[in-house]
Image (cartoon, grey):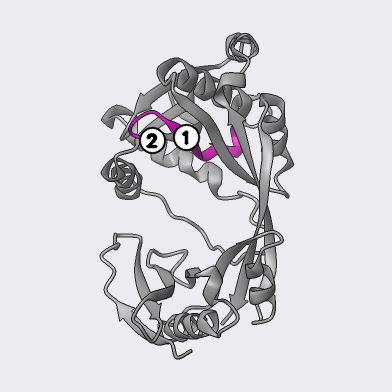
Amino acid sequence: MSVRMTALIDPDAGPSSHRLAWLASGADGAPVGSAFLRLFTRPGQDHLAELELHVHPAERRRHTGSLLLEAAVAAARDDGRRSLITQAQADSPGEMFLANRGFRRVLTLTFTRLPLADADIDALTGIIEQPHPGYRLASWDGTVPDELAETFVLSRRAMDDMPMGSTDFGTVVWDLERVREAAAVVEKRGDLLHTVVARRETDGAIAGFTELVVPGDGRGDAQHYGTGVLPEHRGHGLGLWMKAASIRQARERYPELGGLLTDTADNNPYMRRINDSLGYAPTHTTYEYQLDL
């Protein structure tokens, strides 16, 4: 079967990245696959490209995936990128496809889910009410309030040493523009962003944060985004404290919400212990793959 490749114009662009896109179609013009290449543009990650590639199951083993990959790799190299990353679920056709084309596995991610109806409110309340001398909890919806913007931006440094295996991920440099951009993307989708933070009692500085994105209709599953504690504030149980507060808040505010989703690197035992203790159960495993360009 002959496959026609069409480069598309993708409007999904922002201050931090832009995307290139390709559509693969058969002789009859029906779509059989697609590829999206995200090119990160901010300092710290402007060496990196991220690939999302899909081929219809009925069209696999007909070189469609190879043609899409060739187009994306060529575009990444032309743009001066050093590394290309992508993901494949464990035991999926994507694993063999990537391994046979020079990609190496650099990170293992375990995806977990907490059915919200199973959340133990009494246990969560016990965690939340446990004293944490020198700290207090706070929260907000949507974009960070102006009076907390500066300290929230500084708290994003908590993610700088996030375990990433041997991924050439670089450094995400956060400023107020990027913080507001991230919140705006969630709002534009029609979803709801909720943030819980731990603040230092002495000056109100944010020591750590956890974010949860809830579907706009309050149904289905919500997705945990970043959870981090600044290095100088670790060892006080703030991560568990904040996440317990976020779960209880979701349970109380969204009675029709089904569950909470998260993913954790296998080389991040601290966050894995938190999720295990709160009742999150594994759903599947995904591998991060990287191609050095």
Report helix, strand or loop for mark 1.
Answer: strand
Residue at horizontal 36 percent and vertical 25 percent from the top: 140
Residue 191: x %, y % from top left: 34, 38
As drawn, the label of residue 215 is: 2
Residue at horizontal 35 percent and vertical 83 percent from the top: 28
16 on left or right of 100? left
Residue 224 shown in magenta: yes
227 on left or right of 140? right
Mark 2, Cα crowd under 10 Å, few <14 / some 14-19 / many 20+, is some
Image quadrant of residue 101? bottom right
- The magenta segment: 216-233
Residue extending farthest bottom: 2
Image quadrant of residue 148? top left
Q: Is residue 241 above or below residue 143?
A: above
Report helix, strand or loop for mark 2.
Answer: loop
First-in-chain label (1 vs 2):
2
49 on left or right of 287? left
Q: Is residue 203 at least partly visible in the picture?
A: no
The type of residue carrying mark 1 is Ala
Q: Is residue 180 above or below residue 119?
A: below
The answer to whether marks 1 and 2 mark residues whose Cβ atoms lie closer than 8 Å is: yes
Image quadrant of residue 216? top left
Q: Is residue 98 above or below residue 126?
A: below
Residue at horizontal 55 percent and vertical 38 percent from the top: 261
Residue at horizontal 37 percent and vertical 67 percent from the top: 41
233 on left or right of 246? right
Q: Nearer the viewer, residue 56 or 177?
A: 56
Q: Quadrant of the C terminus?
A: bottom right
As drawn, the label of residue 222 is: 1
Residue 21: x %, y % from top left: 36, 73
Residue 242 shown in magenta: no
